[in-house]
Image (cartoon, rainbow, N blue to C red):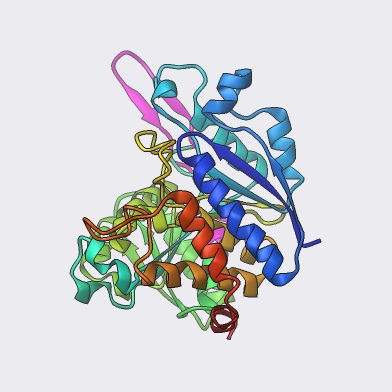
């Protein structure tokens, strides 16, 4: 059996896009002769409504015992009060901590079929293929926090070991790509960034002599992402910088609905999710783009289940479908006919039955 997959549909459009990914995974099973075992559990707002906690014990158990976890989205206006004691996002943060996932991988690649939807000029979009590796467990998001009537503080803290393991992963991934790593920091101001830069330099020099490492200040990197996005190959950075830069980069492709992500640990299951949110304004209307979830499932096939050919086939089927001008409303030109979330997933699944398409993917 290739593996056990836990599905966490979550809130908003999450159930719709996860259902789409399940449709494609079922097609992978048929096409390649696999048998996946699927489990489904609650997380986020729906879990709060059902039992008062955003991460029930049974959900956590189902995730930790799986080979891979596919998440839809969490959150929505009904749970958005920042003063609330329990919020959906707490479930996701706790799940990441419990799974030990320390590196968030976000690929950002452009396709000619979506150039018109990007705010950048076509000449800037050609050849853009970036893999962001964001450190996920340290930094200002997890540091000690204080608050008084007149002041507040958030501690940004990193250990050498935390930096080493994420930079090591970035270099390993770059060795199978263009061999170029850009490490992003703010070493002219922050002490944590000075440690980051020193550590990244040492890891690349001593362990990956074939990798070309460059350093960039985060403000310069943000500017270059818009001016020259094709210059980047693998970008590795700390938690908050990675959060901001990957959201900036997401608009380059033309639709945030196309972008997947993977959160990986040293061992155990990975956590996979589209980078878009729960989109409550379109939830239940059948118009959400399932491609981010489908491509996240492809990353799960590759990184957690070791099924490279299957992952490549899913990616090929997805992009060939988009290239044919087929898509949900966010993917087609204004006034052009759009298809539903379910039909988009079904079309991609059908493409997996095309022997020629699969041969192109695994060639």
Q: Quadrant of residue 107?
A: bottom left
State the extent of the magenta-drawn residues as a range: 142-166
Is 276 in front, or is 104? 276
Quarter of the image for the C terminus: give it: bottom right
Q: Position of residue 301 (x, y in %)?
A: 64, 63
Instruction: Answer whether residue 160 is magenta in the image.
Output: yes
Residue shown at the point (32%, 64%) measured from the top left: 216
Quarter of the image for the N terminus: give it: bottom right
Q: Position of residue 201 (x, y in %)?
A: 46, 69
Residue 306 appears in view: no
Q: Is residue 363 above or below residue 326?
A: below
Instruction: Answer whether residue 229 is magenta in the image.
Output: no
Q: Is residue 285 above or below residue 332?
A: above
Q: Is residue 287 above or below residue 58?
A: below
Residue shown at the point (44%, 22%) measured from the top left: 79
Q: Position of residue 62 (x, y in %)?
A: 73, 40
Is 239 in front, or is 109? 109
Residue shown at the point (67%, 60%) measured from the top left: 304
Q: Is residue 351 above or below residue 118?
A: below
Q: Position of residue 166 (x, y in %)?
A: 54, 59
Q: Quadrant of residue 186?
A: bottom left
Residue shown at the point (52%, 20%) measured from the top left: 86
Q: Is residue 270 left or right of residue 294?
A: right
């Amino acid at each position: 059996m290739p593996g056990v997959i836990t599905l966490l549909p979550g809130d908003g459009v999450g159930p719709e896009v996860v259902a789409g990914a399940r449709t494609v995974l079922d097609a992978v099973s048929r096409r390649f002769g696999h048998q996946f075992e699927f489990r489904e559990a609650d997380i986020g707002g729906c879990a709060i409504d059902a039992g008062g906690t955003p991460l029930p014990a049974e959900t956590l158990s189902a995730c930790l015992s799986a080979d891979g976890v596919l998440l839809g989205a969490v959150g929505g206006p009904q749970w958005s009060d920042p003063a609330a004691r329990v919020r959906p996002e707490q479930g996701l943060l706790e799940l990441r901590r419990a799974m030990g996932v320390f590196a968030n991988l976000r690929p950002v690649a452009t396709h000619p079929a979506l150039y018109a939807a990007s705010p950048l000029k076509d000449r800037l979009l050609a050849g853009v293929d970036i893999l962001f590796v964001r450190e996920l467990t340290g930094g200002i998001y997890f540091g000690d926090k204080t608050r008084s009537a007149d002041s507040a503080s958030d501690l940004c803290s990193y250990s050498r070991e935390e930096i080493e393991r994420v930079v090591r992963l970035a270099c390993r991934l770059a060795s199978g790509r263009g061999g170029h790593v850009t490490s992003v920091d703010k070493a002219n101001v922050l002490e944590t960034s000075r440690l980051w830069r020193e550590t990244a330099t040492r890891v690349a020099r001593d362990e990956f002599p074939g990798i070309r490492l460059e350093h960039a200040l985060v403000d310069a990197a943000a500017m270059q992402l818009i001016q020259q996005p094709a210059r980047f190959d693998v970008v590795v950075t700390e938690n908050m910088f990675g959060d901001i830069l990957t959201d900036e980069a997401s608009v380059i492709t033309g639709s945030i609905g196309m972008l997947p992500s993977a959160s990986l640990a040293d061992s155990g299951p990975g956590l996979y999710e589209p980078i878009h949110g729960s989109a409550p304004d379109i939830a239940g209307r059948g118009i959400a783009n399932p491609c981010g979830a489908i491509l996240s499932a492809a990353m799960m096939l590759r990184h957690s289940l070791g099924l490279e050919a299957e992952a490549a086939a899913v990616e090929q089927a997805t992009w060939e479908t988009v290239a044919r001008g087929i898509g949900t409303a966010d993917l087609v030109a204004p006034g052009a006919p759009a298809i539903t979330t379910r039909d988009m997933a079904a079309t991609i699944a059908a493409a997996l039955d095309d022997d020629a398409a699969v041969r192109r993917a695994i060639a």
